Image (tube, rainbow, N blue to C red):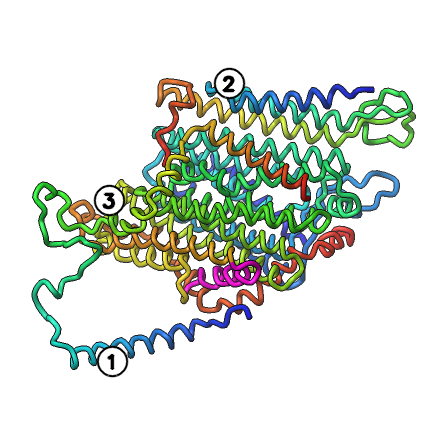
Amino acid sequence: MFGYWDALYFLFVFIIGLILAYLLDRWAKRSGMGTRKTGPGAKIFISGEDPDRVIPGFEHLEGHYTGRNVMWGLTYALKRFFTVLRADHTGLLTDYASYLVIVTAFVMGVLLIWG
Amino acid sequence: MIQFQFITAFLLIALGIYAFLAKNNLLKLILALNIIDSGIHLLLISLGYRVELNEIPTAPIYTGYETLKSPMVGPLPQALVLTSIVIGVCVLALAIALTINAYRHYGTLDVRALRRLRG
Amino acid sequence: MMALPYLMIIPLFGAFSMPMVSLAGRKAREAWAVLISGATLAVGSWVFYRVYEKGTVLYTLGAKSPLGQANFPIRIVWEVDLFGALMVLMVAFVSFMAVLYSLGYMRHDTGLDKYYTLILILELGMLGIAITGDLFNFYVFLEIMSIASYALVAFRNDTQEGIEAGIKYMLVGSMASSLILLGIALLYGQYGTLTMGYLALKLSQNATVVGKVALALLTSGLLFKSGASPVHMWLADAHPAAPSSISAMLSGLVIKIGGIYALARIAFSVYGISISVKTVGWLIILFACITLIVGNAMAVIQTDMKRLLAYSSVGQIGYILLGIGIGLAAYGSRTGEIALAGAIYHTFNHALMKGLLFLIAGAVIHQLGTRDLNDLSGLAKTMPKTTFAFLIGAAAIVGMPPLNGFASKWLIYESSALFNPVLGAIAIIGTAFCTAAYVRVLYTFFGRPSEKVMEAKDPEKSMLWPMVILTIAIIVMGLFPWGISDKVMIPAARALENQLAYVATLMGGG
């Protein structure tokens, strides 16, 4: 029931995956229209950030994958949630203490009613 | 007999918690912590005090208690409170030291000013 | 068992002789710190071996027998079962690594005699919590640990960050400690004893309202200490502000020992089935779910590397609490046992992983002087060994299969899915957020190098070796996951669950 897994299995799966990937690659190369070996099509493309392109006015950001934008989709989709969370972390000591008192009162209430 | 010491203890704890939540001055917060601690110490000390057969209990002398006629104050809470007071003093000293440092950096003792770390 | 007191004596002696030893110069101080923490690790390993081979160990200070004839049996007991011994091993190991790392990392700071004194006192407090069997003794060790960590968080008192984080941590933490003390005082007033075993016995005979109130106070205080949401906010301030070797100990050890271990000990060994385990279990599960989501989600949007790691710690505490909560709610069934084993396993793994990650963050700060993720792009070119270690640590904490994080998380997922599928889904969502956070850091590290990182290089030997050892430990533990689970973690979970044996050991004398 609980977990049939071994590091050895992982190694097997990994090797099988490598072989499959190699076979797929060969098959694609043979049956496709021909893959591009040079030019802009062969460049690595990460999350909308073209490393060689220079945008006017943003030269200082030129081509660093800063990682800032990698999870852009996630943060944008959950923008509301993150805004609420961020606003909740006020950094005020009194708020921290209030949360502690609220948690204590809640736990005590639950334990007294259903404990 | 109404046991005033317990009422006072819980009153002190409640006062301390209220002050901790309502006040904004760092020194007052430290005082509030000490009031909470004092309340708990009073509670612990009161737990050891007992009046049996209308006799005032004697001090807890550990050796030779078999021959004692009157009841004895529980010795354990006093040891606990002594330890706890020492811990309280330690916390107090550290808190005051940090408060002085905070005043040097922020120029104020208002806790509402100490919120550069957030989010 | 005569080795147990040395677990206290060695760090205590080392801590208070440190100012004198450091009069002899920097070399003597460093050698003394390494020697003391190494000796503690040796004793801790021996204690673990002994408990693993021969079962629960009892050590009494004072009267040997619980039954008094002519005089009162005045005594304090230390009781170490397999769970406690595992925690002892974890604390001693990660503390040793942190001390080794401090040699290089703290070289440019002043006041180092105080630093090493405090780090040894911190280790002492944590070891004490792991071995004690007496509630007030537990409180004293908790305060020793807490005060040392308050002081260490504010160690760099020339920075605003350290002072602000120290004040927030200290004041609210003292209030949580006061709540714990109030709970202990109420228990003493009601039952007239402080020994956990007797207390368990008396609670099982008659669980009063006062007992429940005391449990509520203890639970909320310990939830605060373990950094469960919504009382986790001090953690994200305090852990990044400390020096990195201390962050590794705070995130890896303090929140586990002072929070999780103590909570599990009180919920299982002291209270156990004398109150409704379902209520307490679901209460902890509720906090665990909030913690999982909030901690991991907040990690995604951080730009400060150490703050990201601190929020990730909050998220991982959520998994551990989830395991403990299911272990309580499904008390006695196989699912509960597996969940508990998963929680214990994850506690141990997370100490290694988060220790490693904070040490790496420290190495980066040491080289570049910044921990803003936007400035760190392309670190892989100039610090390859550090980046590789980070890759291993991040993969382990996300739960990639060949590493140790997978096995423990898998146990928690599977048992939570069996217990209630909704909880399993929440755990998976938390992992999704966790993955997103670490992928951001990894993309930053493997990106195109900026000018700033060009002069960085891999750290010196005394900082590199602890990272290498922790990485090797993570990989090796990942190779034998089910062996470790069956041989150590499930027996530890059984030892924790078996309240009867805990009480019986106490009665059997030393």
Q: State which chain disc 3 sits on.
A: C
Q: Nearer the viewer, residue C313 or C356?
A: C313
Mark 2: few/some/many CA within 10 Å (<14, 14-19, 20+): some
From the image, tell me which residue sits under label 2: B28
Which percent across, then down, holds residue C376?
A: 24, 47
Which percent across, then down, holds residue C397?
A: 41, 56
Question: As drawn, is C86 to the left or to the right of B96?
Answer: right
Give the mark count.
Answer: 3
Residue drawn at 65 percent across, 62 percent down: C333
From the image, tell me which residue sits under label 3: C374
> Any magenta on residue C408?
yes
Q: Amino acid at mark 1?
A: Leu
Q: Amino acid at mark 3?
A: Asn
Question: As drawn, is C18 to the left or to the right of B113?
Answer: right
**Mark 1 or mark 3: which is in front?**
1
User: Over which residues does the magenta segment extend?
Assistant: C403-421
Q: Nearer the viewer, residue B83 or C278?
A: C278
Residue drawn at 64 percent across, 60 percent down: C494
Q: Nearer the viewer, residue C70 or C375?
A: C375
Marks 2/1: CA–CA distance:
73 Å
Q: Secondary structure at mark 3?
A: helix
Q: Which mark is residue A23?
A: 1
